[in-house]
Image (spheres, rainbow, N blue to C red):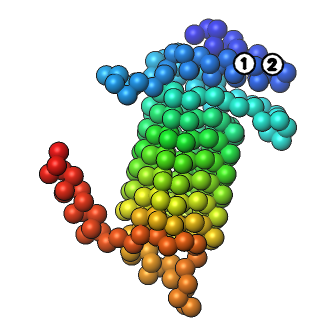
């Protein structure tokens, strides 16, 4: 793994070489940690963990310049430690980040379509304008996350923690918010058309004039309805 650490030091000392080295790191993960749903184990090898650390700790000064795309499409990063990672504009389509730690990470404008982020920690993360269409966020911690203008169309947010999250003008059309924690979440001008939402939140969100803070008509469900669905699924299995 000496080569990995050598490249990390070069990237840290040379902003000119930084982008190309980060692209090499991403290519390494695509080759050595592809996601295979049929694999017996998805545990990360030590060399892949080292590369993840390089990507997490990178210090790039080009945030306001031309975006540098980090391409990790369909990569396995089960439980990866990406705390406070600087990954705006990243291309994480169909990435496997189940149980990953992404608290405080910058994923603004990232593409996370069909990503598996179930049980991931995204607390205080910046996901503004990110594309999370069809993503699996079951049981994820999104407390305090910035989801302004994020696309969460058809995303599964069941049992997710969205307490204090900012979903201003986010697209939640068709999303599953069943059993999600939404206390103090900001939903101003968000689109909840066809989204599945616990009926209890209707009482909390309704204003004095009878209006709701978001756009669109969600599908209101009761806790009992969801419990019945779970029982039916278990019986079918």
Local crowd at mark 2 within 10 Å, few (<14), some, or many (≥20)? few
Q: Is residue 199 above or below residue 176?
A: below
User: Taking the image as drawn, is residue 120 in sight?
Assistant: no
Local crowd at mark 1 within 10 Å, few (<14), some, or many (≥20)? some
Q: Is residue 191 above or below residue 62?
A: below
Please provide percent x and percent y for residue 74. Answer: 51, 29
Q: Are marks 1 and 2 in contact (CB under 8 Å)?
A: yes
Please provide percent x and percent y for residue 224. Answer: 25, 69
**Left or right position of 16 against 36:** right
Q: Is residue 126 above or below residue 97?
A: below
Identify the residue at horizontal 39%, vertical 56% (top origin). Answer: 158
Q: Which residue matches tag 1?
A: 21
Identify the residue at horizontal 76%, vertical 16% (top origin). Answer: 10
Q: Quadrant of residue 21?
A: top right
Q: Secondary structure at mark 1?
A: helix
Q: In what quadrant of the picture does the C terminus appear?
A: top left
Q: Is residue 73 above or below residue 235?
A: above
Q: Which residue matches tag 2?
A: 17
Residue closer to the observer: 110 or 142: 110
Q: In what quadrant of the picture does the N terminus appear?
A: top right
Q: Secondary structure at mark 2?
A: loop
Q: CA distance from mark 1 to mark 2?
A: 6 Å
**View extreme (left): residue:** 235
Q: Quadrant of residue 60?
A: top right
Identify the residue at horizontal 30%, vertical 69% (top origin). Answer: 223
**View extreme (top): residue:** 2
């Amino acid at each position: 793994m000496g080569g990995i650490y050598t490249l990390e030091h070069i990237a840290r000392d040379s902003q000119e070489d930084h982008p190309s080295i980060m692209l090499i790191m991403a290519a390494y993960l695509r080759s050595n940690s592809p996601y295979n749903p049929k694999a017996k184990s998805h545990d990360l090898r030590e060399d892949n963990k080292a590369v993840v650390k390089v990507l997490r700790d990178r210090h790039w000064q080009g945030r306001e310049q031309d975006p540098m795309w980090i391409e990790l499409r369909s990569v396995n990063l089960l439980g990866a430690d990406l705390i406070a990672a600087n990954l705006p504009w990243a291309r994480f389509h169909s990435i496997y980040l189940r149980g990953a730690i992404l608290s405080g990470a910058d994923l603004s404008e990232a593409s996370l379509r069909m990503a598996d982020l179930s049980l991931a920690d995204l607390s205080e993360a910046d996901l503004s304008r990110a594309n999370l269409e069809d993503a699996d966020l079951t049981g994820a911690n999104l407390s305090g996350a910035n989801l302004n203008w994020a696309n969460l169309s058809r995303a599964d947010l069941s049992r997710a923690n969205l307490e204090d999250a900012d979903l201003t003008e986010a697209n939640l059309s068709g999303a599953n918010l069943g059993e999600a924690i939404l206390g103090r979440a900001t939903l101003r001008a968000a689109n909840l058309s066809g989204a599945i939402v616990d009926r209890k939140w209707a009482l909390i969100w309704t204003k004095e004039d009878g209006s709701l803070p978001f756009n669109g008509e969600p599908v209101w469900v009761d806790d009992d309805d969801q419990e019945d669905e779970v029982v039916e699924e278990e019986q079918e299995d």
